Amino acid sequence: MAPNDDNQVKPTVKPNAHPDAELHQGEHSIIPHPPPDEHPQNKAYKPFPDTGWTGTPDIPSKDGGYSEEDFLHKPPYEWRSEGDKFVPKYRSQCWCGNVAFEFHGDPLDAKHCHCRQCQHLHGAPFQWAVIFPKTSVRLVKNVDNSLHFFSTAKRTGEHYVPCKVSCNVCRSPIFDEGRNVVLAYPSSFKFEDGHVPKEFQPTAHIFYSERVMEIPDGIPKWSGHKGESDLIQEMTDDSGKMPKYKGTDPTEQETQTDESRSNL
């Protein structure tokens, strides 16, 4: 913390610049330029691991919608790994324990999403998700057929990809099923000693332009999708963005005290 010329204390915010991006100094971290096109950040996900899925199609429900028949017996639900190539590394489950999934390997990426849809559906300022290939996910528990699907496109409780997956009993959100990958929620994972692995730490904030809460964590902030939108500053003076000091400004308090004394 360092005082400015007006003797008012303002927070020191570390810039959230991508190491290859141009940095323009300002009151807060202002990043007007995206990273160079050749940077790995702008490339596709690393290759999906071979986990023993030999069925068809290679990625179930990749065409979206109702396209996949018998989807419950294909990734990311109940399915058999040829040669036992699927080696569980992580496990997630709903709050009541009726629904559980296993995950092979580490996530491809992790992110915080600030879009209004995530805010509304999660009842939170933003969503935290890690990305796994569908063939790296397997359903291992579904007591009383508790698995529940919700289509955000149709606004109906059915398996229409992309869709949100949760428990029908405790209503815990578990993951989003996309056409190629699963966006799982780390809050439902059971980590050893409760320590979050480094691979689960976000590499970006996306749709930060729709945020209701500012996060000065130094992680790149994208206005829309990562690598497909503008990098933007992580803090502003917008009074509509949390967190903001709710108490009385110290200078205003001193003024009020002086006025009170003058009226004695």
Image (cartoon, rainbow, N blue to C red):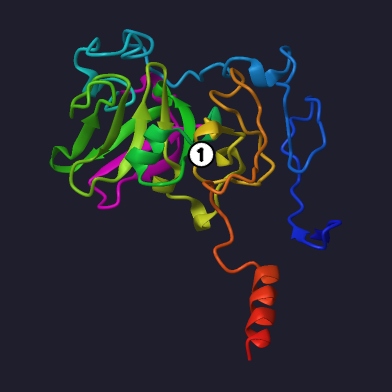
Location of the N terminus by quadrant is: bottom right
Q: Give how far across and how far down residue 8 sits, in percent.
A: 77, 61
> What is the three-letter code of the residue carrying label 1?
Arg
Q: Is residue 130 magenta?
A: no
Q: Residue at point 42% right, 46% down?
A: 189
Specify the farthest residue to the bottom.
264
> Could you say whether the residue bearing mark 1 is in a helix, strand or loop?
loop
Q: Give how far across and how far down residue 86 sits, in percent.
A: 42, 27
- Residue identified by numbered label 1: 211
Q: Give how far across and how far down residue 44 sits, in percent.
A: 58, 15
Q: Residue at point 40% right, 22% down?
A: 135
Q: How many marks?
A: 1
In the displayed structure image, the side of residue 170 where residue 215 appears, left or right? right
Location of the C terminus by quadrant is: bottom right
Query: Start and end of the magenta stretch?
Result: 80-106
Q: Residue at point 19% right, 42% down?
A: 168
Q: Give how far across and how far down residue 104 sits, in percent.
A: 46, 31
Depth order, front residue of 58/112: 112
Whether 111 is drawn above or below 135: the answer is: below
Q: Quadrant of residue 161?
A: top left
| Residue 33 visible in the snapshot | yes
Specify the farthest residue to the front.
263
Q: Residue at point 40% right, 25% down?
A: 84
Specify the farthest residue to the right.
5
Depth order, front residue of 246/174: 246
Depth order, front residue of 241/222: 241
